[in-house]
Image (cartoon, rainbow, N blue to C red):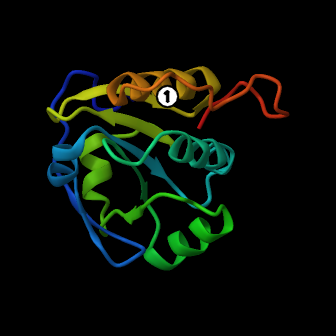
Amino acid sequence: MQPLPEGSQAPDFVLRGIDGKEYALSEALKQGPVLAVFIKTTCPTCDLILPYLNRLAETYRREGWQLWAISQDDAEASRRYAERFKVSFPVVVDDPGWPTSRAYDPPVTPTLFLIGPTGRVEAATWGFSKADLNALAERLAQVLGEPPKLVAQRDDGNPDARPG
């Protein structure tokens, strides 16, 4: 199974966050790229990647890009999960039947899509990979005009990669 391929137009979506706000991809893209990460609260690889995503969100200024976790679980489970991992970015809940997940077709959780301001998928990766996280951080740094920063150290006690 392959996710929505790089270079393709990202399907627009509007999802409600666990904070009660609505998040519309088309609106967010007016301010810069969006890193959309599909997760499940029962996914051990999601547990592994969330601290790195928090670090990514905290490493680069919040203007000019956005990071959203798209949960495939209900709002209450997603809220508890976000609290458990002290998630520092919006968590939105895919509607019943997972229409957004079906449109993007993530092969596993987590799956990450970097969606550029033009609405095209600029990068897609799935599972946990420190190399992929650092490459995404470098791409964001270029867009933001900042020096790239390492968000996933090699010898930090976690594996360099893990399938989803």
Instruction: Find the residue positioned furthest to the front.
Output: 146
Q: Is residue 82 left or right of residue 91?
A: right
Closest to the observer: 72 or 123?
A: 123
Rate crowding at label 1 as few (under 14), some (14 to 19) or many (20 or more) other CA atoms within 10 Å.
many
Left or right of residue 128: residue 36: left
Q: Residue at x 49, y 22 (%)?
A: 147
Q: Position of residue 6 (x, y in %)?
A: 28, 22
Q: Quadrant of the C terminus?
A: top right
Query: At 24% across and 32% down in the image, what residue appears?
Result: 116
Q: Residue at x 29, y 41 (%)?
A: 104
In the image: residue 105, left or right of residue 158: left
Q: Secondary structure at mark 1?
A: helix
Q: Is residue 74 left or right of residue 65?
A: right
Q: Residue 129 is drawn in which quadrant? A: top right
Q: Looking at the rendering, which quadrant does residue 42 occupy?
A: bottom right
Q: What residue sits 76% from the left and 22% below the top? A: 154
Residue 159: give x, y in percent of width and height: 77, 29
Q: Is residue 72 above or below residue 148?
A: below
Whole-percent x, y for residue 148 in the image: 52, 22
Q: Nearer the viewer, residue 101 or 68?
A: 68
Residue 160 lies, in percent from the top left, at: 72, 24
Decide: is 157 above or below 97.
above
| Quadrant including the N terminus | top left
Instruction: Say if 31 sits above or below 147 in the image.
Output: below
Instruction: Identify the residue under disc 1.
Output: 137
